[in-house]
Amino acid sequence: MRINDFDDSLDPVILKRGRQYYQEGRVSRIEKTTAGWTAVVAGTHDYRVEVQLEPNGFIRFSSCDCPYEGGEYCKHQAAVFYALRAGVTTGGPGGQETMATGPMGGLEKVLTDMEPGQMRDIILDETRALFQAHIERSAREADQRSKYKQVCVMIKTYKKACGELAARSMITELCRLYPRRPAFLDELGRI
């Protein structure tokens, strides 16, 4: 599926809701990352969407941290797809601006011009975000105690890497998202 024709592949209801969210301006903080794009979409809560695009526009990967389980893509992802196809970001001062679509040589210049600690900070931030997204995705897909335990092992590793406060925040959020999974809540309570 490509960013220019994703609407041929998504469920019509998801497309309609995603288009509505995009048109209502619910997509914010669209930012270029080392792995692709991230955005926040305002829904019942603020949801983080990640999208990785190939240079030819092929959508290599997309995820959303919302609890939607009705298919591969949710309305939040569709809203971000619309924004990316329109070539809009919201990360700049003053709101929306056109995406930078230059060659990779520009990236090399940016990296060369960075202060020594900036790249380390970017890598650490992105790694934390990817780790968190992986745990959230695993929790969303878990459906039995053995898988819940695997998620909890990941959270323990996350706790070692990112600290007690970050782990507690994640546990609190998972408890909020999955109150009808008593076995999962039990395992989370043991961390």
Image (spheres, grey):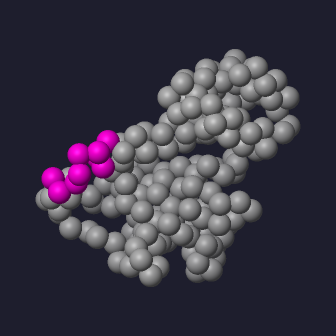
Was residue 113 drawn as part of the magenta stretch in this picture? Answer: yes
Report whether 1 appears left or right of 157.
Answer: left
For the N terminus, which image quadrant?
Answer: bottom left
Residue 33 lies within the magenta run: no
Q: Is 40 situated above or below 130?
A: below
Residue 168, how many percent across, how many down? 68, 35
**177 sits left or right of 85 in the view:** right
Which residue is located at x 38 percent, y 79 percent?
Answer: 97
Residue appearing at x 29%, y 45% in the figure? 117
Q: Is residue 94 visible?
A: yes
Foreground residue among 71 and 81: 81
Instruction: Give the x, y percent position of residue 2.
Output: 39, 61
Query: Where is residue 187 shown, x and y percent of the image?
Result: 76, 22
x%, y% of residue 41? 60, 64
For the residue pair 114 and 62, the one nearer the viewer reads as 114
Of residues 150 and 127, the one drawn nearer to the viewer in this rendering: 127
Residue at 70%, 48% (x, y): give it: 67
Instruction: Give the position of the C terminus as an image quadrant.
Output: top right
The secondary structure making up most of the magenta span is helix
Q: Is residue 24 above or below residue 110?
A: below
Q: Is residue 59 visible?
A: no
- In magenta, the rendered stretch is 112-120
- Tag count: 0
Please say if 173 is above or below 21.
above
Q: Nearer the viewer, residue 128 or 177?
A: 128
What residue is at 79 percent from the left and 44 percent from the top? 176
User: From the viewer's perspective, is 110 left or right of 38?
Assistant: left
